[in-house]
Amino acid sequence: MTVGGIECAGRARRRRARPNRRPPPRPAPPGFTRAAVKPGAYALITPESRTWAPAGGAGWVNASWAHLASPAGGARFSMALVDLGASGAIGTPPSLAVERLMFVLDGEVEVAQEGGAAFALRADGFAFFAAGAAHAATSRAGAGVLLYERVVRAGDPRLETPVRGVASALPTTDPGGGETFALRKLLPPTAAFNVHVMDFEPGQHLTTKEAHHNEHGLLMVEGQGVYRLGDDWHPVTVGDAVWMAPFTLQWYGALGTTRTRYIIYKDTP
Ligand code: UGY
Ligand code: MN
């Protein structure tokens, strides 16, 4: 019997149970997102909650961006996904006091810089530009780029020279503290701006339940696991981005069958 559209218990009992019948995959319920924002502490921005807009400002051509962390949300840096279309260009930094790092996620970007030869960056390639260093970045066929920017702060140790490389080709560094993940630092560890690539095999996890003065901006590029942020535990996967404020309790455990890789900004030292 059905009452008000709901099947009542009497009829349910008469039906044969089919525990092995798989329900068809369903789209997420309306309004559902895994994204979670705790102002002042952290923001988990999942792909379904990214918002894209045409990238604006001097020099931007045929590009859109989705901001994943920014001063508007409490971060002291910004982190954006940039979708460069064909013949697209990344604009100049918003001021001469901004240092930035571009990390290519897919496609190819041609980079020109003052006083140096032009070069191409493909997926996994990155380039850092010191504050005020003139440069241009364009793409013939389109590319996806993760862009970190921050305004240099008085007294901060900073890099004056450009740096470029291919993340996977860098040697790993001992993370210390009994940690077992594979760590690659994209920039010299002496400056107040760094970006690391961290790899975890399934089952590996941070040893330290970290609470530190550094701030983070992270993008999951491979794998899946659980991120502890404060007292909350979030399942995370490829495409998820996390901003962590200073002293936000943080821990990660890798799950599944494939390696986790994340790219993480850290205001060192
Ligand atoms: O360097 C770090 O602070 C890094 N281990 N944090 C993190 O992965 N959440
Ligand atoms: Mn940390």
Image (spheres, rainbow, N blue to C red):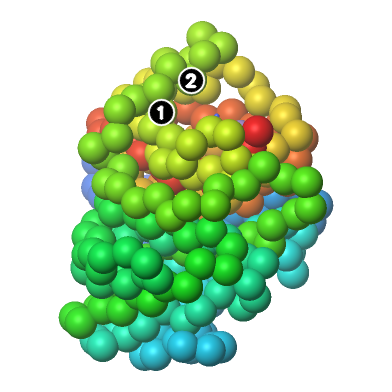
**Residue at the spot 30% in from the left edge and 28% down from the top edge:** 171
From the top left corner, tell me how far across and down residue 22 is, in percent: 26, 49
- Tag 1: amino acid: Leu
Residue at disc 1, secondary structure:
strand
- From this viewpoint, is residue 48 visible? no
Residue shown at 36%/83% (left/top)? 89
In the current view of this chain or complex, which residue is farthest to the left? 141
Q: Along the horizontal axis of the image, is 163 left or right of 49?
A: left
* Rendered image: mark on residue 253: none
Q: Residue at x 34, y 25 (%)?
A: 172
Question: Mark 2 vs ligand 1: CB under 8 Å?
Answer: yes
> In this view, which residue lies farthest toward the front?
115
**Residue 165 or residue 17, whichever sits in front:** 165
CA distance for labels 1 and 2? 6 Å
Q: Is residue 199 left or right of residue 30?
A: left
Q: What crowding class fits label 1: few (fewer than 14 Cα within 10 Å), some (14-19), or many (20 or more)?
A: many
Closer-to-camera residue (206/197): 197
Q: Which residue is mark 1?
A: 183
Element type where label 2 sits in the image = loop
- Mark 1 vs mark 2: which is more N-terminal? 2
The answer to which quarter of the image holds residue 11 is bottom left
143 and 194: which is toward the camera? 194
Tell me: is circle 1 under 8 Å from ligand 1. yes
- Up/down of 134 relative to 249, above or below: below
Location of the C terminus by quadrant is: top right
Which residue has dot 2 on it? Answer: 175
